[in-house]
Amino acid sequence: MDVTPATTGDAGQRAASITLEGIRKRYPDGTEAVRELSLEVRAGELVVLIGPSGCGKSTVLRMVNRLIEPTGGRILLGDEDVTRVDPVELRRRIGYVIQNVGLFPHQTVLANVGTVPRLLGWARDRVRRRSEELLELVGLDPGQFGRRYPHELSGGQRQRVGVARALAADPVVLLMDEPFSAVDPIVRTRLQEEFLRLQAEVRKTIVLVTHDLDEAVRLGDRIAVLSQGGRLEQYATPAALLGAPASPFVREFVGEDRGIRALAVTPVTRDVLDPAPVDPAGLPEVALGSSAYDALAVMLTAGADRALVTVDGRPAGVLTRESALGAGR
Ligand SMILES: Nc1ncnc2c1ncn2[C@@H]1O[C@H](COP(=O)(O)OP(=O)(O)OP(=O)(O)O)[C@@H](O)[C@H]1O
């Protein structure tokens, strides 16, 4: 296995696609946690699994790194069948982040982050350099935090150390099970934003399980909505999911306020614009590509029912309140 440490620049080349082909899990007591699920996650994509409690999300996730053995179907990383790979070796290639992180309490932050590289037999200096680099990447100063123990950190800081540890050996895939749910809502929003920035840099293939629809919409390139038995109800971008729920189950799951959520993830595009007036003076302005939600906010603030949409400061057309509202449908 190639264990070349990634600089942030080349990390993205080492993301692998994940293909679930008709996977099944029947627990020994007869529970059919996953009846048959097929799903493809592209290399570098962030996919969110969401669905009601007990629908099989964690089971699906843990089959990918073989903490749980599937009872049927195939799972491919790139074009490699994971059931043919030694599970311990497999898990070193797959980062895994869970709620409450599971840091080793008697090891320092640096030692925690360096766990997998150490297991892989990297030289000490290299482990240390990599661990420090990772701490910086997740926004923790190694000088300040490296020597601390997990109980000397806040919940949000622990979560970041968990993410740094999961990235340390430059995994091709990152699995995250409710990674942000143990921290309060304000810290959670900040961690989500930081995480999106981090992902823009490292471009890993990520599968993230959550209960939180706002989190799914904020983070997911695509969202897979599951119902009991790991049944795939819909697999779509946040905007498509909110704008066009594929079934009554999804419609109910995304809820009454899906319209507002949809506005927040639907950009203003040229096809919803009216021609720009000759004299646009007095109209509030919004940039093409802003969310329909932001465009409506600009109109509301200005007490206007239209806004001038601009590209690089030049008029591209006019957005009416009706077409902004319509964009989320
Ligand atoms: N070891 C086990 N033995 C038997 N049944 C299990 C086992 N682990 C999970 N289950 C069952 O499998 C189903 C799916 O569980 P899983 O934890 O994957 O769901 P989930 O969607 O992640 O749930 P939650 O959102 O509540 O964490 C549930 O009915 C659960 O009770």
Image: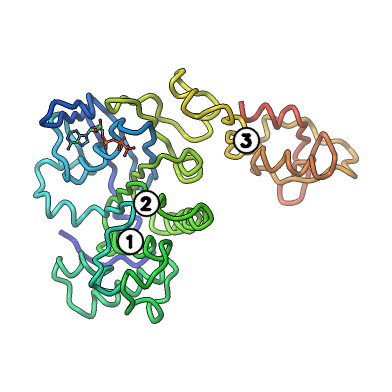
Which callout, 2 or 3, points to the residue nearer the camera? 2
Image quarter for residue 95? Answer: bottom left
**Residue 147 x %, y %:** 32, 79
> Does 194 appear above or below 282?
below
Label 3 beta carbon less than 8 Å to ligand 1 = no
Q: Earlier in the sequence, mark 2 or mark 1?
A: 1
Identify whether 242 is placed above or below 282: above
Mark 1 residue type: Gly
Question: Looking at the picture, how far across and down is residue 24, in whole percent?
Answer: 19, 28
Q: Amino acid at mark 2?
A: Pro
Location of the C terminus (image quadrant): top right
Label 1 secondary element: helix
Gap in Å between the C-alphas at discs 2 and 1?
Answer: 9 Å
Secondary element under disc 3, as helix, strand or loop, is helix
Q: Which residue, given by chain and number where applicable, does mark 1 sit on?
A: 162
Residue at image position (17%, 72%) is 122
Task: Return the mark for residue 263.
Answer: 3
User: Which amino acid type is marked by label 3?
Assistant: Leu
Image marks 2 and 1: residues in contact by CB distance under 8 Å: yes
Q: Pinpoint residue 205: horizontal percent, then vertical percent.
A: 33, 48
Among numbered discs 1 and 3, the one appearing first in the sequence: 1
Task: Provide the residue designation for mark 2.
Answer: 179
